[in-house]
Amino acid sequence: MRSRYSAFVRRDEAYLLRSWHPDTRPARIDFDPALRWRGLDVLAATEGSAFHSTGTVEFRAHYTEGGRAGELHETSRFTRHDGDWVYLDGTLRG
């Protein structure tokens, strides 16, 4: 999760696409040039160890966009694909 957040900060499209499950991966990522990521809080995680094939991470990612503060609160699902952990999908939380 932290590596994907860092990839969003750096706008590293190649890493994000590589770490996204092929069944849900978009063709490309359109980064908003006005959006700046400011911090990540990992709130909870389930499973995701070497003994699991799936896991979840609940997080809040803080950003500014056009000078206004905001946050993305999501529970992300991860799964193993070809031996690597990849992002499957997420549910936005309110």
Image (cartoon, grey):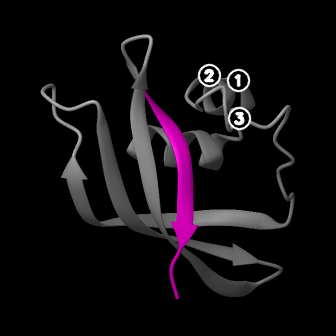
Residue drawn at (23%, 39%) of the image = 48
Q: Is residue 55 left or right of residue 16?
A: left
Q: Position of residue 31 (x, y in %)?
A: 82, 50
Q: Position of residue 34 (x, y in %)?
A: 85, 66
Q: Earlier in the sequence, mark 2 or mark 3?
A: 2
> Which residue type does callout 3 highlight?
Arg
Magenta span contains residue 93: yes
Q: Is residue 27 left or right of residue 36?
A: right
Mark 2 packing: few (<14 Cα in 10 Å), some, or many (20+)?
Answer: few
Q: Are marks 2 and 1 in contact (CB under 8 Å)?
A: yes
Looking at this view, name the residue that lies furthest to the left.
Answer: 51
- Quarter of image, res 58: bottom left
> Which stretch is magenta?
85-94
Residue identifier under label 3? 25
Magenta span contains residue 76: no
Magenta span: chief secondary structure = strand
Depth check, mark 2 against mark 3: the one in front is: 3
Residue drawn at (70%, 23%) of the image = 14
Residue sitting nearer the eye, 30 or 26:
26
Mark 3 element type: loop
Residue drawn at (42%, 41%) of the image = 78
Residue identifier under label 1? 14
Mark 2 element type: helix
User: Image quadrant for the N terminus?
Assistant: top left
> Which residue type does callout 1 highlight?
Ala
